[in-house]
Structure formats: C-alpha cells, structure tokens
Amino acid sequence: MKKAIFPPNAAKPLAPYTPAIQAGGFVFLSGQIALDEQGTLHTADIATETRKVMENIGNLLKTAGLDHSHLVKVTIFLSDMAHYAAVNEVYGSYFSDVPPAREAVAVKGLPRGVNVEISGIAYRP
C-alpha cells in the first residue's frame, strides 16, 4: 500500500504529481527545486539554490518522520555540469556519515528554468 506525503508548509506541485510517496519502508521523493511555499524561486546563485532544494527535501523527509540520513539513492539534475562542484559542496554538508548512492547528470532544461533539481529514495529501517 502507498501513502501520499504532502508537507503542510511546501509549495503546491507545479504538475500532476505527489511530492513524496511512502511504500513499505521506502519513501520516494519527487524532484525538488528551489521553490518556497509562496511559490518564489530562490536562485540568486547555485549555492543558495542548492541549499533551498536540500531544505525542501528535508521538509519532505521530516513529514515522513525521517531526515537526510535516511536517503539511500539520489539523482541530481543540473542545467550545466559547470555547477557540479558548487552543488557538491552544499549537498555534501547535509551528510555527516555515509552519503547516499547517487548520480549527477546535465539535462537540456529543468522546470521553471532552475539550475538544479534533486530527487531521491529514503529508507525507514
């Protein structure tokens, strides 16, 4: 059985999708961008943008009773691989022990013209 996860203080989805789905011990996170609950994008620079994305992921995880340490798999979508090092610096600060498995790929375009989108899978032991 699956359960939809909608954080109370998050932006409404931009398309027909659920922000996160819990299925068994797993929580599947839809791609998150740097959008706040008022619908404002935080894209002043790539570090600010990445930090907001990671905060949004943290908000989803918290609603599910988890945190960043529960992530087991992450995909990072970048508008340009030139952002790779800066994104890694911010992203890495959210993991103190074993970071999740992941890949980072450059794509032709992302929603609302953002530079980074991150999706993930978390596990509840």
Image (cartoon, rainbow, N blue to C red):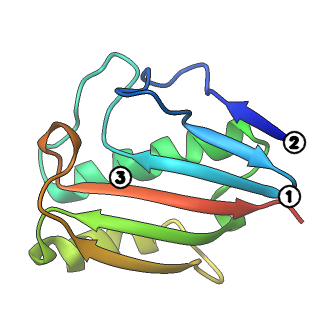
Which of these two is toward me, 89 or 121? Answer: 121
Question: What is the C-alpha distance between the residues marked 2 and 3?
Answer: 32 Å
Which of these two is toward me, 74 or 94? Answer: 74
Q: Earlier in the sequence, mark 2 or mark 1?
A: 2
Label 3 neighbour load within 10 Å: few <14, some 14-19, many 20+ = many
Residue 103 position in % (x across, y down): 41, 80
> Element type at marker 1?
loop
Residue found 37% across the figure and 28% down from its top: 15
Q: Earlier in the sequence, mark 1 or mark 3?
A: 1
Question: Which residue is disc 3 drawn over?
Answer: 51
Quadrant into which the C terminus falls = bottom right
Q: Quadrant of residue 62?
A: top right
Residue 32 position in % (x across, y down): 41, 46
- The reply to whether dot 1 and dot 3 touch (C-beta < 8 Å) is no
Residue found 87% across the figure and 42% down from its top: 1
Residue found 22% across the figure and 77% down from its top: 84
Question: Which residue is disc 1 drawn over?
Answer: 25
Q: Nearer the viewer, mark 2 or mark 3?
A: 2
Disc marking residue 1: 2
48 left or right of 74?
left
Question: What is the C-alpha distance between the residues marked 2 and 1?
Answer: 11 Å
Residue type highlighted by circle 2? Met
Does residue 2 sit above or below 7 in this rendering? Answer: below
> Element type at marker 3?
helix
Residue type highlighted by circle 1? Gly
Q: How many marks?
A: 3
